[in-house]
Image (spheres, rainbow, N blue to C red):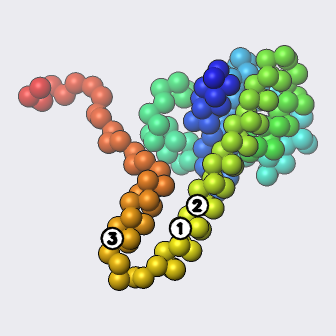
Amino acid sequence: MKELIVQEIIGRKIYLIRGQKVMLSIELAALYGVEVKRLNEQVKRNIKRFPDDFMFQLSDTEYEILKSQFATSSWGGIRRANPYAFTEQGVAMLSTVLNSERAIQVNIAIMRAFVKLREILSTNKDLAHKLNELERKTDKHDAEIQKIFEAIRQLMAPPPEPPKRKIGFHPYSKS
């Protein structure tokens, strides 16, 4: 059970940026129990291990979008540089430059989360394909069956983002 909770927490820290599933240096450092500055130092000392398909730095726009999208206050403060994004291979490579016992255990958990995410995506893709095949074989005029297909598709779709609540006090509000 504990492993599932850890995988779920890690899974929420995997983002899709530039068409790749990545984890940010900010969150990796927190998981590893090191300062972001120290993680970046280790990466820079071993930069040959991190080609562009393993790691890239977020643009100002990407960083601002992520901050606003997730309203993450822990990313705030003054930064000298935007965070780095590590692909699955980049995270695996981090295990060669961060050698503490905690880093090893965290890397194992992260790799398992990436594998689980890949399995979930594959399962949904297979299910969507089978659903399309079945729909093609049914009579298009059967409205009830079409409603069932639509209901299944809605269940397979990711949940919509809840509306963002405004935080703070407005001096002229009536609440």
Q: Residues within 10 Å of mark 1 (few under 14, many from 20)?
A: some
Report the Cα–Cα distance between label 1 and label 3: 15 Å
**Type of amino acid at the residue the image marks with label 1:** Leu
Tell me if I can see residue 127 in this picture.
yes
Report the Cα–Cα distance between label 3 and label 2: 20 Å
Find residue 122 and report its horizontal and vertical position in percent.
66, 55
Question: What residue appears at the point 71 percent right and 17 percent down from the top-left corner?
Answer: 33
Nearer to the camera, 33 or 67: 33
Find residue 137 and report its horizontal and vertical position in percent.
52, 80
- Is the Cβ of the residue at disc 1 closer than 8 Å to that at disc 2? yes
Nearer to the camera, 104 or 169: 104
Q: Which one is earlier in the sequence, the residue at label 3 or at label 2?
A: 2
Mark 3 vs mark 2: give the one in front: 3
**Type of amino acid at the residue the image marks with label 2:** Leu
Identify whether 134 is placed above or below 93.
below
Q: Quadrant of residue 91?
A: top right
Nearer to the camera, 25 or 93: 93
Tell me the residue that label 2 is attached to.
127
Identify whether 81 is placed above or below 152.
above
Tell me the residue that label 3 is attached to.
144
Horizontal side, residue 170 vs residue 158: left or right? left
Q: Which one is earlier in the sequence, the residue at label 1 or at label 3?
A: 1
Q: Secondary structure at mark 2?
A: helix
Find residue 128 and report its horizontal and vertical position in percent.
56, 64
Q: Secondary structure at mark 3?
A: helix
Q: Which mark is residue 131?
A: 1
Q: Quadrant of the N terminus?
A: top right
Q: Secondary structure at mark 1?
A: helix
Mark 1 vs mark 3: give the one in front: 3
Horizontal side, residue 140 vs residue 40: left or right? left
